[in-house]
């Protein structure tokens, strides 16, 4: 008699356990990871509206190079606002709302220093893809470089169809290497074309407490 009762009880417990497991599986769907996450690959998704920021990566500089010389900046900062962060695979979209350059020097002949480097006509559409190499693109940036010279100031404005780079999960950086630009306005003393190089990181989500690092999934 007791054996039958114990057997029936164990069967009932097993059935309840199986039902609870099945119910939990139905109630807890798989987590969907988006293109951008915080803290780690597969971490919490970056929210639409989040503000991502980065300074220059340690030991790196911004370099605007041309056949006439270089402008090198030891400090730079960018900020983007995330407007789309879809489930992977896909492309996240952000708006570049700020980018500053400071502590700049130049090797241009006749220049006595750098007055300013300014990114014009903000914001710019920025995309970050989780495809091979984690490509990043900033569409249509226009930059004005103003130099102090022995005869006054020289302002040169340059435009690029896109500045293309790539992100890295190893260092949480975004790197641009020798991205071409061409002169859109300025006197004949301004070089007709040149390149832009820089590495920013770690990229942080400043909308979240402690500003965690951002990863591409």
Image (cartoon, rainbow, N blue to C red):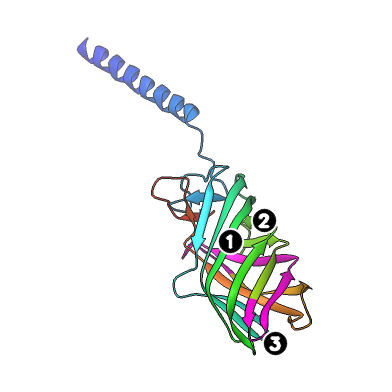
- Residue 193 in the image: above or below residue 93: below
- Judge by depth and name the residue closer to the eye, 187 or 140: 187
Q: Which residues are magenta?
A: 147-175
Instruction: Give how far across and how far down residue 205 sits, in percent.
Output: 48, 51
User: Residue sitting at 40 percent across and 23 percent down?
Assistant: 20
Magenta span has 154?
yes
Q: Are marks 1 and 2 in contact (CB under 8 Å)?
A: yes
Instruction: Give how far across and how far down residue 23 sits, in percent.
Output: 45, 24
Judged by its main secondary structure, the magenta piece is strand
First of labels 1, 3 by sequence position: 3
User: Residue sitting at 61 percent across and 53 percent down?
Assistant: 97
Q: Which residue is mark 3?
A: 67
Magenta span has 16?
no
First of labels 1, 2 by sequence position: 1
Q: Which residue is mark 2?
A: 122
Q: Which residue is mark 1?
A: 99
Q: Secondary structure at mark 3?
A: loop
User: Residue sitting at 65 percent across and 63 percent down?
Assistant: 119
Can you say which quadrant of the picture contains the N terminus?
top left
């Amino acid at each position: 008699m007791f054996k039958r009762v114990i057997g029936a009880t164990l069967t009932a417990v097993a059935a309840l356990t199986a039902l609870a497991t099945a119910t939990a599986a139905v109630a807890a769907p798989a987590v969907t990871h988006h293109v951008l996450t915080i803290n780690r690959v597969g971490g919490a998704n970056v929210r639409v509206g989040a503000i991502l920021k980065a300074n220059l990566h340690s030991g790196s500089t911004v370099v605007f190079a041309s056949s006439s010389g270089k402008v090198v900046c030891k400090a730079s900062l960018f900020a983007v606002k995330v407007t789309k962060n879809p489930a992977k695979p896909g492309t996240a979209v952000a708006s570049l709302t700020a980018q500053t350059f400071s502590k700049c020097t130049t090797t241009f002949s006749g220049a006595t220093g750098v007055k300013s480097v300014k990114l014009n006509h903000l914001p710019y559409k920025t995309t970050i893809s989780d495809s091979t190499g984690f490509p990043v693109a900033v569409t249509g940036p226009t930059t004005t470089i103003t130099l102090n010279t022995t005869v006054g100031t020289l302002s040169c404005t340059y435009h690029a169809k896109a500045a293309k780079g790539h992100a890295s999960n190893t260092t949480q950086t975004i790197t641009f290497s020798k991205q071409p630009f061409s002169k859109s306005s300025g006197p004949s003393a301004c070089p007709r074309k040149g390149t832009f190089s820089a590495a920013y990181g770690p990229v942080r989500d400043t909308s979240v407490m402690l500003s965690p690092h951002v990863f591409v999934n």
